[in-house]
Image: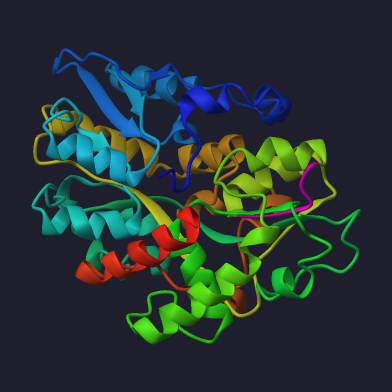
Amino acid sequence: MTTRRTFLQRITALSSLSLAGCGWRLADVRANAKTSGQRDQLYIYTWTQYTDNQLLKTFSTQTGMKVLADVYESNDVMLAKLQAGGGSNYSIIYPSDYMVQKMVEKDLLTEINHDRVIGLENLFPRFQDPTYDVKNRYSIPFNWGTTGIVYNSEILKDAPEDWDYLWQNQEQLKKRMTLLNDVREVMGAVLRMLGYSYNSQDENQLQQAYEKLKEIKPKITAFDTEAWQNQILAGDLVLAMCYSADAIRVSKENPKLKYVIPRSGSSLWTDTIVIPKTAINPDGAYAWINFILQPEVAAQISQRLNIATPNLAGFEQLPINLQQNTSLFPPESVLEKCERITPLGKFDEIYDRYWTQLTSS
């Protein structure tokens, strides 16, 4: 199940997104690269859109180290590969916040030696002691974002303000809207709409969310995390549940596409950098972390890749129009209503059961 990022083989097919026009090129990344494990090389395992050729070249120039990036399509794919022993050559991995917790529980991560890290003080205060990894013991934040709704403002004159817009306007939106193909995001959004937590462990509340989703399912084009981008640009869709980074990307192609964070709240996520216990080049891993924490590098990444930096010193180097982009950097009043997705242990199985019933019926 794809969760947040677009997989390499698929994104290269999205020609209408004109990635080159966004000011960056795809890195030399491969889904199944063979690695040699040499210590003068650094192998990283990341999401497709979190690196580019310019970033890799700059790092190599600064360190004299060759860096190669492989990509994965979801946190679960990454975790499965590591647990199967297929990730032994990687010294840097980019898990999402909740996955950091899972990987710590499974004893897969090296505790970061902060004496070897330069630039942690550059982070926004909220990222110096995150709830998912207290004091950044095992991870360094790389970027962050929200989940919300992107819509065609030329067709939908009244902007969606909350998740209930989909139910109230389901006939107008019939077969012209999509929801994410992600159980925790979709169930969480409906739970939040109903006044509950994104991370509810009350089965009665999950049942209510499931019934609401059953009601609207016939009107949904698909549960989809990536194909919606081409479809909304082509005019086949008028609304999609999405991640903020993807919404910003398509809105650059069509300014009539607007992104909103529902007023009842949504999810707040952070993707991070970690060092696995199997890292064969820990010196290179720390060099990469220190490179990423440089304010000028953080600012360049944010501009080229259209992602929100957790680096305050880097943020201050961004053009004022980016600093004031509320889709990229929402105000505190909005963030206060958002929740992080957290692991729920065995209760995750109940979410999966309802999701299977919903998507297979």
Image location of residue 41, percent across then percent down: 22, 17
Q: Residue at x 52, y 38 (%)?
A: 301
Q: Nearer the viewer, residue 337 or 284?
A: 337
Q: In which image quadrant can residue 228 be found?
A: top right
**Residue 313 falls within the magenta-colored stretch:** no
Task: State the colouring used for the structure image.
Answer: rainbow
Residue at point 35%, 84% (across, down)? 202
Q: Position of residue 183 (x, y in %)?
A: 43, 60
Residue stretch in magenta: 236-241
Say whether residue 237 is magenta: yes
- Left or right relative to 274: residue 197: right
Q: Which residue occupies the extreme front position in the image? A: 361
Quadrant of the image containing the N terminus: top left
Observer-nearest of 28 and 168: 168
Is residue 264 toward the left or the right of residue 311 in the image?
right
Whether residue 313 appears in this view of the structure is yes
Q: On screen, 202 above or below 114?
A: below
Query: Looking at the image, can residue 337 be seen?
Result: no
